[in-house]
Image (tube, rainbow, N blue to C red):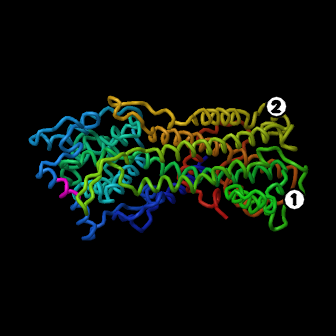
């Protein structure tokens, strides 16, 4: 166990090592990888100081102030919010309105967003405001960037957003923290925001008209969670493919199910990519594949490219949806700094993120179901072609006492069932809210949280499958002395270095927890998920 701990600690240290290039926020497009790298501390968020960028940002803020000076009517600036937009706010009270917005939205409940999720939220909101159409000052962007720089993380409850008008309730905790209110996490402890800002040498922000809306009336929470979910879903696809190759080998399966000519006949890119990786892993293209023991394997092995391939094809499509949202101005109203026009619309609606998350969680859950079926084959001697029941490695008199991976297979079925249950699409559960002003809402944040829950369960399934594949391949070696293909040999060597063979029954929860950590961070690198 000491060797296991040392190995995994080394992996985590590797994953946490910072990258040297900063992510510059200047209104130009950012990608999912940039947000994820900021979230886990590998890259630093830096606000552009370019003169032209600063001038564009401040020009929008001046438009708002000029309209106020001209007695213009601006939603949420000189009026109440939502259905209350017909209520005129007296000029003497306009300055108080942003404070009231984040104050009355302090109704969040549920778990607090994790540190990486909170950093992603701050980065996503900063990216949107940097588009220059939100009517905020450059100073506001500096304060958001300062939270990231000092790692002062607002305590954001996960529940309470319907995804239009954006993530109002969770983002109210960002606005409040900027103003020195509510709680933050800093240097390992929870504390009042005002204390953390003071210790970091940051003055609390006093919001100007429109700035409360600009922070809160957008899709930053759902978009941030979607960026993190997307990366984890991509990793799930790659690891599931490697596991399938190990399981085909362990069950003496037929690697020719993944033939290039076969997949050329059905030109979906995702299945073709998965089949190509399986051919590489099983050394089919090199002519090294063993003669199959049977003509056709069961669907969970033979059709693996078709199942995992759906997720593979969903990834580029959903990336586009998420990154378009990330690089959008998505609050309301928008302020055009060039023409001075105030544009009232509904860009806070998170339908694209909701669709992306509902789609990804369904594709991921199907992959988990595939792996659950593969494990059912591995542990049943009627279908594993020579492997012992429950993959027990105990022999002789000890064989009657030990139960191998029996309970692990039950747990995998439980996690898979819960993931499948969670795939009910959130986006179809729109509710009419706020006096029927918000009468069609996206539920994008709920969809993103659901997707993360499916991925959390999925990483538990993947971890269990790594233990099982390591066990099954080792037991196949007792039956068949044939050499593992090079890629699989590399993976099996890594697995053996951190997971002792289960001979005598032992609790596996600590090993599973460590494997989940490796899967979530991707710290095992090409050992588990090389593209090829």
**Secondary element type, mark 1:** loop
So how many labels did they put on this image?
Answer: 2
Q: Main secondary structure of the magenta part?
A: helix
Seen in the picture, residue 150 relative to 361 is either above or below; the reply is below
Helix, strand or loop at mark 2: helix
Going from N to C along the chain, the mark reached first, 1 or 2, is 1
Q: Nearer the viewer, residue 8 or 204?
A: 204
**Callout 1 crowding tier (Cα within 10 Å): few <14, some 14–19, many ≥20:** some
Identified at 75% across, 52% down, the residue is 246
Tell me the residue that label 2 is attached to: 400
Based on the displayed image, in which of its 4 quarters is residue 385 positioned?
top right
In the image, what residue occupies the spot 19% across and 48% down? 209
Image check: 8 left or right of 474? left
Q: Is residue 61 magenta?
A: yes
* In this rendering, position of residue 417 left or right of residue 487: left
Question: Of the numbered discs in the image, which one, if any, rests on residue 519?
Answer: none
Rate crowding at label 2 as few (under 14), some (14 to 19) or many (20 or more) other CA atoms within 10 Å.
few
139 is within the stretch colored magenta: no
Front in this rendered view, residue 147 or 250: 147
Q: Residue furthest top?
A: 435
Position of the C terminus by quadrant: bottom right
> Tag on residue 290?
1
x, y (%) of residue 156? 35, 40
Q: Residue at x 68, y 40 (%)?
A: 369
Where is residue 333? Give x, y as percent.
Answer: 29, 48
The residue drawn where x is 25% and y is 61% is 339
Work out which residue is located at the far bottom of the displayed protein and give it. Answer: 51
Q: Which residues are magenta?
A: 60-64
**Residue 417 shown left or right of residue 138 in the figure:** right
Q: Position of residue 401 (x, y in %)?
A: 78, 31
Question: Measured from the top left, where is residue 122 in percent x and y?
Answer: 35, 51
């Amino acid at each position: 166990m000491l060797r296991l701990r040392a190995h995994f600690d080394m992996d985590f240290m590797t994953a946490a090592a910072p990258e040297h290039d900063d992510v510059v926020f200047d209104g130009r497009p950012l990608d999912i990888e940039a947000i994820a790298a900021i979230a886990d501390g590998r890259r630093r968020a830096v606000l552009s100081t370019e003169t032209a960028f600063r001038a564009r940002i401040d020009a929008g803020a001046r438009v708002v102030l000029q309209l106020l000076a001209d007695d213009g009517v601006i939603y949420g600036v000189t009026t109440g919010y939502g259905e209350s937009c017909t209520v005129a706010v007296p000029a003497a009270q306009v300055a108080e309105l942003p404070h009231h917005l984040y104050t009355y939205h302090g109704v969040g409940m549920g778990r607090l967003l994790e540190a990486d999720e909170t950093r992603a939220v701050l980065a996503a909101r900063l990216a949107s405001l940097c588009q220059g159409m939100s009517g905020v000052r450059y100073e506001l962007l500096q304060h958001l960037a300062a939270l990231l720089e000092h790692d002062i993380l607002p305590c954001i409850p996960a529940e309470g957003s319907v995804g239009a008008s954006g993530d109002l309730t969770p983002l109210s905790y960002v606005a409040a923290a900027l103003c020195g209110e509510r709680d933050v996490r800093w240097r390992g402890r929870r504390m009042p925001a005002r204390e953390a800002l003071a210790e970091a040498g940051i003055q609390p922000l006093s919001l100007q008209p429109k700035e409360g809306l600009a922070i809160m009336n957008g899709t930053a929470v759902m978009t941030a969670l979607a960026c993190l979910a997307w990366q984890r879903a991509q990793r799930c696809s790659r690891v599931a493919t490697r596991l399938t190759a190990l399981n085909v080998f362990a069950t003496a399966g037929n690697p020719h199910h993944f033939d290039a000519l076969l997949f050329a006949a059905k030109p979906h890119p995702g299945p073709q990519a998965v089949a190509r990786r399986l051919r590489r892993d099983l050394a089919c293209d090199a002519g090294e594949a063993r003669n199959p023991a049977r003509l056709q394997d069961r669907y969970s092995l033979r059709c693996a490219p078709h199942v995992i391939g759906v997720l593979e094809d969903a990834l580029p499509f959903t990336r586009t949806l998420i990154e378009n949202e990330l690089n959008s101005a998505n609050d309301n109203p928008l302020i055009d700094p060039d023409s001075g026009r105030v544009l009232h619309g509904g860009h806070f609606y998170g339908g694209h993120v909701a669709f992306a998350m509902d789609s990804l969680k369904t594709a991921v859950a199907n992959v988990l179901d595939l792996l659950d079926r593969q494990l059912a084959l591995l542990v049943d001697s009627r279908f594993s072609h020579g492997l012992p029941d429950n993959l027990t490695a105990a022999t002789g008199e000890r064989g009657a006492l030990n139960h191998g991976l029996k309970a692990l297979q039950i747990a995998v079925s439980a996690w898979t069932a819960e993931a499948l249950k969670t795939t009910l699409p959130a986006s179809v559960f729109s509710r009419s809210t706020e006096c029927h002003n918000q009468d069609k809402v996206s539920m994008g944040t709920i969809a993103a949280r659901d997707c993360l829950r499916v991925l959390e369960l999925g990483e538990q399934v993947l971890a269990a499958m790594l233990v099982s594949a390591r066990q099954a391949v080792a037991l196949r070696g007792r039956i068949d002395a044939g050499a593992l293909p090079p890629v699989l040999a590399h993976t099996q060597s890594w697995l053996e270095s951190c997971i002792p063979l289960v001979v005598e029954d032992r609790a596996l929860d600590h090993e599973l927890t460590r494997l989940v950590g490796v899967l979530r961070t991707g710290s095992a690198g090409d050992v588990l998920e090389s593209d090829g």
